[in-house]
Amino acid sequence: MKIHFTKILAFLALMLFNLELSAQYFPASDSTNVQVQENKKNKASRNLNTKSFWDDVYFGGNFGLSFGNQATSVLVEPLAGYNFTERFSGGLGISYQYYSYKDYFGVKQESNIYGGKIFSRYRVLENIFVHGEFENLSYQRVISRDSTGKYEYLREWIPGLFFGGGFFQPFGKKGGMSLMVLYNVLYDENTSPYPEPYVIRAGFTF
C-alpha cells in the first residue's frame, strides 16, 4: 500500500511540475503576442490622432495667359485645397482677370473681371493629373456703340466649365509646380471673357 501511495505521489508531483513548466512557457508567448498587437494598435491610433485637418490642407495659386487675334487675357487666382485621399483633392479659388481687346473699329477696350470657382483634381500617375472646375465671373463687356463713338457697357455673370489635365512637379511635403491645359465647354465667343476656349495655366502649391 505504501508503494502504491508513493507511486501516486510521484506521478502527481511529475504532473504538477509539467503543468508549471507549461504555465511558465505558453502564457508568456501569448502575452507577448497580445502585447505586440496592442503596441501596433496604439501606434496606429497615435498616428491617426496626431494627424490634424490642416495636414491635408494646401494653398497656392494659378497664373493664366491667353492670346487671341484681337484679345489678351491675364489671370491671377489664389486657391485653397484639401487632399481627401492620396490621389484626389478639391478646393475653392478666387479669380481676378485683366482682359483687353480691340473692337471692330480698332479701339482698345479693357475690363476687370472677378469671381470665384470650385475645382477637383485627380492624380492618375505620379506627375500627371486630370482637372475639372466650375467658375462664375463678373464680366463687363461692350454691348453697343453709338454714332458718336460712345460705348454702352453691360456687366453680367458668365459661367465657365473647364476640363483638362496637366503635369505636377512636387517639392517639399505639400508644395509643387503645375502646368495644365483646360478646355471651356461653355465657351461662347460673344459673351466669354476668354478669347479662346483653350486656356493654359501655370500654378503652384505650398
Image (tube, rainbow, N blue to C red):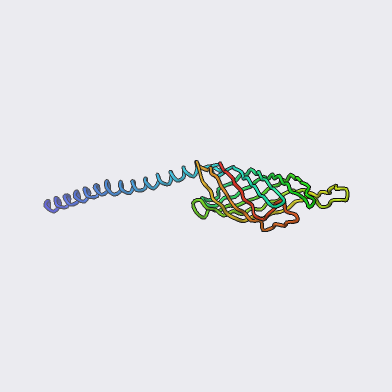
In the rendered picture of this protein, how many numbered marks are placed on residues?
Answer: 0
**Towards the viewer: 86 or 16:** 86
Give the answer, above or below, for where 185 lies relative to 107.
Answer: below
Q: Residue at x 71, y 44 (%)?
A: 98
Q: Nearer the viewer, residue 97 or 67?
A: 67
- Image quarter (top left, top right, bottom left or bottom right) of the C terminus: top right
Among all residues in the image, which is located at the extreme front? 106
- x and y percentages locating residue 76 in the rendered image: 65, 43
Image-based side of 157 in relation to 31, left or right: right
Residue, far bottom: 185
Percent position (x, y) of residue 113? 73, 46
- The answer to whether residue 52 is left or right of residue 34 is right
32 left or right of 177 in image: left
Q: Residue at x 57, y 50 (%)?
A: 89
Q: Is residue 194 left or right of residue 176?
A: right
Q: Residue furthest right?
A: 147
Tell me the residue at 66%/53% (across/down).
134
Residue 15, horizontal then vertical, whole percent:
21, 51
Q: Nearer the viewer, residue 127 or 43?
A: 127
Point out residue 83 in the picture as x, y percentages from the top left corner: 55, 48
